[in-house]
């Protein structure tokens, strides 16, 4: 038991705060962003939800070197359909809550 408490004492306060789960805890990033039906419109994106405390997810399109917010979905939703997907567009997804936004997923691109 003493070993564990000594270990915990060495963890910086900022890290301890991030590890605490709750509505304002730092989020785990969503993972494994995939694009279904690459050559057609509409295009469906799907990802894995790895957070337990997100308020939802934000979807961004990257096109012509410009990152644009295109949609927001609720918690535990892991798909989004982009009906206006231009050829060559890439996407990323983040989780969000009161503490802010997580890091983004991998990027997934629509093949022209």
Image: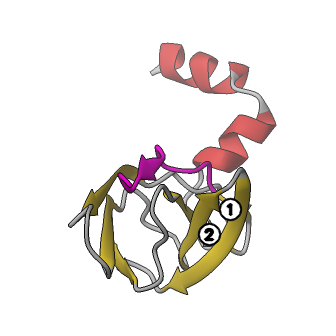
Residue drawn at the location 70% of the way across and 69% of the way down: 68
Q: Secondary structure at mark 1?
A: strand
Residue drawn at the location 26% of the way across and 64% of the way down: 39
Q: Secondary structure at mark 2?
A: strand
Residue 1: x %, y % from top left? 44, 22
**Main secondary-structure element of the magenta-colored stretch:** loop
Does residue 107 belong to the magenta stretch? yes
Q: Which mark is residue 24?
A: none
Q: Are marks 1 and 2 in contact (CB under 8 Å)?
A: yes
Looking at the image, residue 35 sits to the left or right of residue 58; the answer is left
Q: How many marks?
A: 2
Q: Which mark is residue 96?
A: 2
Nearest to the observer: residue 42 or residue 28: 42
Label 1 Cα crowd, 10 Å radius (few <14 / some 14-19 / many 20+): some
Nearest to the observer: residue 37 or residue 60: 37
- Report how far apart the C-alphas of labels 1 and 2 lie in the structure: 4 Å
Does residue 100 belong to the magenta stretch? no
Looking at the image, residue 46 sits to the left or right of residue 4; the answer is left
Give the magenta range. Answer: 102-112
Nearest to the observer: residue 96 or residue 60: 60
Residue 102: x %, y % from top left? 62, 55
Residue 86: x %, y % from top left? 49, 70
- For the C terminus, which image quadrant? bottom left
Looking at the image, residue 90 sits to the left or right of residue 17; the answer is left
**Dot 1 corresponds to which residue?**
101
Residue drawn at the location 56% of the way across and 83% of the way down: 72
Q: Quadrant of residue 61?
A: bottom right
- Whether 105 is drawn above or below 78: the answer is above
């Amino acid at each position: 038991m003493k070993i564990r408490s000594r270990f915990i004492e060495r963890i910086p306060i900022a890290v301890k705060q991030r590890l605490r789960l709750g509505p304002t805890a730092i989020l785990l990033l969503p993972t494994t962003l995939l694009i279904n039906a690459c050559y057609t419109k509409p295009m469906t994106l799907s990802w894995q939800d790895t957070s337990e405390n997100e308020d939802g997810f934000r979807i961004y399109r990257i096109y012509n070197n410009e990152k644009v917010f295109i949609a927001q979905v609720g918690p535990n939703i892991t798909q989004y359909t982009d009906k206006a997907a231009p050829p060559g567009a890439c996407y990323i997804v983040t989780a969000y809550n009161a503490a802010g936004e997580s890091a983004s997923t991998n990027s997934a691109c629509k093949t022209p």
